[in-house]
């Protein structure tokens, strides 16, 4: 449906609102300008929100890195340079607590790496049971210093009741197992 105004009516409407036309044009121009400004500000706000999210993500990652550095520093305090007599004393105490008899402890050559030094030890022990051996290995690997059991060989002890032999006192031997362990102790040596 098309609305038609007679030419005279349009001229009279124009004359009636003649003073208001510049205001209407200004209002329409202002609305278009405001819409343009709104779109540009919305784009700026969107990009600022993206930047804020990236910065928050960076802060979260930096916080995780900071926590990791604190953990590493706490471990470095535990992993300082070791000396053989102190290590042997600790191993001897762990063996005594586990009812293990140490036959020999033989330090191996140190292996120096850029951030740590590895101290290998070869232990020969006698034990009354597999349970005692397991308890000893568990205590070694759960010790506050970094001790690792790299290898273990288990066989009947010489003169043990397992092979049908008697001890020097005439009764069955209490040390049934002979175990050879290869231990590694790790000590931090690198610079912070």
Image (tube, rainbow, N blue to C red):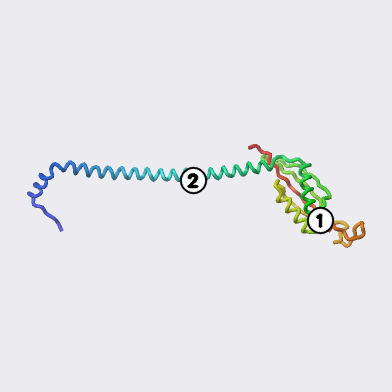
The residue that disc 2 covers is 57
Residue 63: horizontal and vertical position, in percent? 54, 44
How many discs appear? 2
Residue 7: horizontal and vertical position, in percent? 8, 50
Q: Is residue 60 above or below residue 178?
A: above
Q: Residue furthest front?
A: 97
Label disc, if present, on residue 95 of the rendered structure: none
The residue that disc 1 covers is 127
Q: Is residue 64 above or below residue 153?
A: above
In the displayed structure image, the side of residue 97 where residue 20 appears, left or right: left
Q: Label 2 vs label 1: CA separation?
A: 55 Å
Point out the image quarter for the C terminus: top right
Q: Residue at x 11, y 47 (%)?
A: 13
Residue 96: horizontal and vertical position, in percent? 80, 51
Q: Residue furthest bottom?
A: 164
State the residue in front, 12 or 143: 143
Do the CB atoms of the residues marked 2 and 1 lie less than 8 Å apart?
A: no
Point out the image quarter for the N terminus: bottom left
Q: Is residue 134 above or below residue 12?
A: below
The quarter holding residue 4 reads: bottom left
Q: Residue at x 92, y 57 (%)?
A: 169
């Amino acid at each position: 449906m098309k609305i038609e105004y007679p030419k005279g009516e349009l001229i009279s409407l124009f004359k009636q609102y003649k003073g208001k036309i510049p205001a209407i044009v200004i209002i329409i121009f202002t609305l278009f300008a405001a819409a343009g400004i709104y779109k540009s500000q919305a784009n700026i706000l969107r990009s600022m929100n993206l930047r804020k999210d990236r910065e928050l993500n960076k802060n979260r990652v930096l916080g995780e890195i900071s926590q990791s550095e604190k953990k590493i520093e706490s471990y470095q305090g535990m992993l300082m340079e070791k000396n053989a007599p102190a290590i042997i004393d600790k191993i001897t105490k762990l063996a005594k607590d586990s009812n293990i008899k140490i036959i020999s402890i033989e330090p191996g050559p140190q292996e120096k790496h850029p951030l740590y030094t590895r101290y290998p030890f070869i232990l020969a022990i006698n034990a009354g049971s597999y349970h005692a051996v397991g308890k000893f290995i568990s205590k070694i690997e759960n010790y506050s210093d970094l001790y690792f059991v790299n290898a273990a060989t288990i066989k009947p002890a010489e003169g043990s009741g397992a092979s049908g032999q008697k001890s020097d006192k005439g009764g069955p031997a209490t040390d049934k197992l002979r175990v050879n362990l290869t231990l590694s102790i790790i000590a931090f040596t690198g610079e912070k």
